[in-house]
Structures are given as C-alpha cells and as structure tokens.
Image (tube, rainbow, N blue to C red):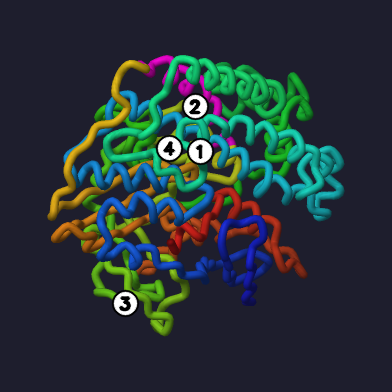
Amino acid sequence: MSRLVVGPFNRVEGDLEVKLDIANQVVTRAEVVSPLYRGFEEMLRGKDPRDALVIVPRICGICSVSQSIAAAEALGEAQGLLPTPNGQLVTNIVHAAENIADHLTHFYMFFMPDFARTVYVDQPWYVDVSDRFAAMKGSAAQDVLPRRAEFFHIVGLLAGKWPHTLAVQPGGVTKTVAEHELRRLLALLRNFRRFLEREVIGIDLQAFSALTSRDELLALVDQQGPTHSDLFRFIDLSHGLGLNCLGGATDRFLSFGAYRHGTTHLFGRGLYLGGQNRQLNSGLITEDLSHAWMNGPDAALHPFDGVTETDPEMADGYSWCKAPRLEGKPAEVGALSRQVVAGHPLARDLVKTGGNVEARILARFLEIALLVPTMENWLNDIRTQDSFMTHASMPDNSTGAGLVEAARGALGHWLTIEDGKIANYQIIAPTTWNFSPRDQAGQPGPLEMALVGAEVQNGETGPVTVQHIVRSFDPCMVCTVH
C-alpha cells in the first residue's frame, strides 16, 4: 500500500488536492481536500438581506449568474414574491447563456487538454487531438474563444455586465428589452447556433438532442469520421479509451430543477435512483461536519439550521468542504444528473450501467443542443410592452430558499432574516455535493467514490485516469468553500 497526493491541480477554479491510497496500481481509497477557506457565509451575517444580491455573485466569476439567481429566489421566497413573466424569461436566457459558456469552457480549456499529453502519443488520434486541444497552443481555443465571447454579448445586453450583475432581482430583472434589441439578440444566437452545428457538435442541434442512445452516437462518428467535429473527436477517443467505464460514483442523480417557468422547470426537479425518478424533498437535505475543519453539533443539520464556524485543528477534518447529504446519502449533481432526472432518453441510456466520465461530458453537449433552440423560443416569448419586474417590501422576520442549477449542478441558498438582518445564510454549491468528504457514517463523497478502482501506473505523479475522473466533475473549489 502506498499514498500519493495529487495536486494542486492546474486548470481548476481554486485549490484542490486528492490523497490516494494505492495497492497493485489501483486506487483503493481517496480523500478529496479543499485546502482554501473563504467564508462568505460568515460575511453575510448581520447584513441587510438585499446585500446578498451584491455579495454572493462574487463567490465565483464563472457561475456568477447562478449565484445571483439563487440569492434572488431565496429573497423572493422570503418576500412571497415571484418574478414577472418577462423577468423570468430574461433571467432564464442570461442563466442559460452562462451555463452554455461554462460547458464550452470546461470542454475546451479544462478537460480536453489532458488528451494532448504524451502518455497518449501512441494513440491513432493523438496528432489530431494534440493539434486541436493542446493547452494554450491548440487551434480550438483560437476558434472557440472568440465565438464564445461574441455569444456572451447576450449576457451583457440583458444583464448589464458579467460577472457580478445586479440585474437579477427577486421580482424579475432591472433591464427592459426593446423590439430592436430582441432582433439583435436573436441574430447573435442564430450565428452561434450555426457555429455549434458546423464545428462543435457537427450536426443540427435538434437532430442531436433527438438521439436516444450511445450506439446512435457511435454510428454517427463511424459515418462521418471523428474529425467531422470536436464532439466527434471526443466520442472517438472516449470509445477507444473506455471512458464510459471509468469514474462511476453514487448513481444517485440529483437536480434542483433548471430554468423556472411558473411553478415548473424546463429540466425537472428530483432524484433519480434505481431506474426511476423520486420527488425531491429538500427538507431532507443536511450538511455533515464530521470530516470538515468546522465546529458544530455532531448531528447533521438542514441548511436553515446550519452552522459555519471554522476549526482548522479539528481532529477528524481533512477538508474545508462540508458533506451535504440527501436522505442521509451522497448524491451526484451536474449536467448529467439534470438530464437523467429530466428523463432524456440519451442521458438515461448513457447511465444504464452507471454514471461515468464519458456520460458527464456528453450530457453537457446534450444540454447545449437543448438550450440554444429554447433560448430562441424564450426571446420570441418576451412581450416588450409588459413589465419586467415587480416589487415587495422586505419582512423583518422570514426565511427563504433559492434552489437552482448552475452548469456544474445543484446550487442552494438558504436565508434566515431576523429583525431585518441576515441571521443565517447557508450555501451548498455543486462541487460541495460532488467533492464532499466522508460523513459521520464513513460514506465517501461522489468523487471519492468515483476514484476507487482508477489505475495508477508506476512512476505517475499525476495519474491520467485520476485527472480524467476529477475533471469530468468540473471542480470549482472557490464555490465549494465560498
């Protein structure tokens, strides 16, 4: 038995280490360490509740809009306030744009450069993939980043700025949209769609989202060749390397529901377990502190009752990350979980033998293909003559929760107001779910579970299989330790 510490990881938002126990060149146990603490929950105590709209978007410069929406929904629930229809449409458009951009950033900047490593030099696809995806040098970055920036003008036009917009409010959005702006937004979106269909995904978006099985995807790659698009390149190498058999975790897939429409969501809320969906009872979410550098009660608490008090000397702690649990058990979150819970046939087929590295990546492309046409519909649904925001007074005493889906998965904000001030504000970010430490029962978090069984070759200090598994969850450690 040997111990290997992998980290700090490059191309990761924040600091991350992974401690691995290895026997016979296989990981037998993993501990995921979040070594940086930031303390936003402590900063928020005693503030005016509306200050959350300014403070929490600064948790992260990547999922800033998601943080804004979670805060706005928590405040809205505390006020008994829902956004206007126009306000909800604009919020959804801005949110979808951020999540799509995040999916592309993850694929091109964080995940694919690992396949340009010389460990793969003997693979038939190596020269093409290295030329395309090598970090800082590949042709993909030169092609995709300008297109991403052009697409992101949608956020600037509707939210004023990114990151850290103040446009998203409990009752809607501060920005009104004129008819000529709708035409410009639709033109931006349609240009971006053509780019996706030509270079990124390689086929019509609606045709891609209509696929129902992995076999159909493989058949497309066989017919048109792996260099037909960047997605096809990934599918080809993934099939050859067996990434669909790597990185299985809890197979409990959780989604808070994405893109609200009245009382429903475009992608539904729930827990997928054992081949079927179960209704989400958010009252059964708890946070366990037993292996975090935190003081608090022995019992795991619901976030409304949660405690964030640091203790770097805590004997059993090995991470600043708490251990969120649903019904006492860990759950995986992310684009794959969203699409599995939403019931998409392709996503369900990809996990028929369990979650895996390949499925997590493909789910992001599936989501892009679903969202871009939907954004066109949302833009067409805006009625420029109607209100974009409504208002309500802030109660002196109240509670509210904002449950949304960032690109990386389920994000929750829980707010308690007493005497007109924030008495408690607890946040569970997507990476908190996926990168959580063990809990009091000894249950590992999803990534800790997924790393068990990964191969480690003699002499590897940054095992490539470990890298692929970690990056498939797309860590954002600054959100984890907010």
Of callouts 1 and 2, which one flags the residue occurring earlier in the amino acid sequence? Answer: 1
Residue 434 versus residue 202 in the image, above or below? below
N-term-proximal mark, 1 vs 3:
1
What is the CA distance from the residue labelled 1 to the residue labelled 3? 34 Å
Quadrant of the frame with the C terminus: bottom left
The residue positioned 50% from the left and 61% from the top of the image is 448
CA gap between label 3 and label 2 equals: 42 Å
Identify which residue is drawn at 64% across, 68% down. 7
Kindly identify which numbered label has been placed on residue 371. Answer: 2
| Element type at mark 4 | helix
Q: Which mark is residue 338?
A: 4
Contact (Cβ within 8 Å) of mark 1 with mark 2: yes
Residue hosting label 3? 295
Q: Amino acid at mark 4?
A: Arg
Characterize the local packing of mark 3: few (<14), some (14-19) or many (20 or more) Cα atoms within 10 angstroms: some
Callout 1: SS = helix
Which residue is drawn at the image coordinates 51% and 20% (left, top)?
373
Q: Is residue 277 something that shows in the picture?
A: yes
How much space separates mark 1 and mark 2, taking CA atoms? 10 Å
Residue in the picture at 48% in, 18% down: 182
Q: Position of residue 470 (x, y in %)?
A: 59, 55
Label 4 to label 1: alpha-carbon separation: 13 Å
Q: Which mark is residue 99?
A: 1
- CA distance separating discs 3 and 4: 33 Å
Quarter of the N terminus within the rendering: bottom right
x%, y% of residue 143? 75, 34
Q: Which residues are drawn in magenta?
A: 362-383
